Structure formats: structure tokens, C-alpha cells
Image (cartoon, rainbow, N blue to C red):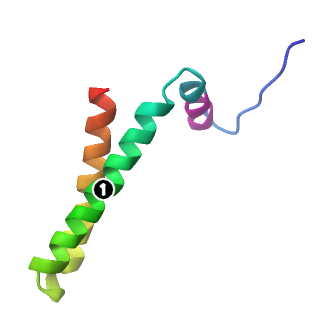
């Protein structure tokens, strides 16, 4: 019996094909690395950066987390 799977957009199709293809572990590791990087950067920002400059540094922490996640995916 055959099944017909209808995806809402190409990103959803690529996501499900990558999970079924065995790429779930690298995605989970990259998400974990991103969260750890963001939490570490934010804690450093809260300790060492004055309150009036924290918004920019918090945004840079988010960028650092994204870069770390992409680096992990590329390395794995």
C-alpha cells in the first residue's frame, strides 16, 4: 500500500526528510549547543556589561548561538 504525504511548504518537506534520513542527532546537538551558548553569553553580559548597553550584547548572544549551531551542523 502506498501513502501520499502532502507537505505545506518545501522547508517542512526538507525537515521531515532529514529526520527520516538519520539527521535527527546532529540537529538535536546543534540545538543544545545553541541554547548553552546563548545562556553562557547572556550570563556574562549580565555580569560585566552596564544595563544601558545590554540590549545590543543580548542580541549578539543570539547571533553567537546561531553561529555555534550552524558550526556544529557543518562539522557533523
User: Which secondary structure is most common in the magenta stretch?
Assistant: helix
Q: Residue at x 17, y 87 (%)?
A: 51
Judge whether 69 appears above or below 40 on screen: above
Q: Looking at the rendering, which quadrant does residue 4 occupy?
A: top right
Q: Residue 45: x percent and y percent? A: 17, 73
Q: Decide which of 41, 54 is in the foreground and name it.
A: 41
Residue linked to disc 1: 36
26 above or below 32? above
Tell me what residue is drawn at x 19 percent, y 78 percent: 46
- Residue 70's x, y, as percent? 31, 39
Asked whether residue 15 is drawn in magenta, I would say: yes
Q: Which corner quadrant holds the N terminus? A: top right
Who's the residue at 76% across and 31% down the image? 6
Q: Residues within 10 Å of mark 1 (few under 14, many from 20)?
A: some
Q: Secondary structure at mark 1?
A: helix
- Going by the image, does 26 lie left or right of 56? right
Residue located at (56% from left, 36% from top): 11
In the rendered image, the quadrant that contains the C terminus is top left
Q: Nearer the viewer, residue 11 or 43?
A: 43
Residue 59: x, y in percent? Answer: 26, 67
Magenta-highlighted residues: 11-16
**Residue 41 falls within the magenta-colored stretch:** no
Q: Quadrant of residue 26?
A: top left
Amino acid at each position: 500500500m502506498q501513502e501520499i504525504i502532502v507537505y505545506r511548504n518545501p522547508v517542512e518537506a526538507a525537515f521531515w526528510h532529514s529526520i527520516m534520513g538519520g539527521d535527527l542527532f546532529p540537529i538535536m546537538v546543534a540545538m543544545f549547543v545553541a541554547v548553552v551558548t546563548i545562556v553562557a553569553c547572556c550570563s556574562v553580559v549580565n555580569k560585566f556589561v552596564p544595563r544601558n548597553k545590554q540590549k545590543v550584547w543580548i542580541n549578539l548572544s543570539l547571533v553567537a548561538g546561531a553561529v555555534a549551531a550552524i558550526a556544529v551542523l557543518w562539522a557533523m
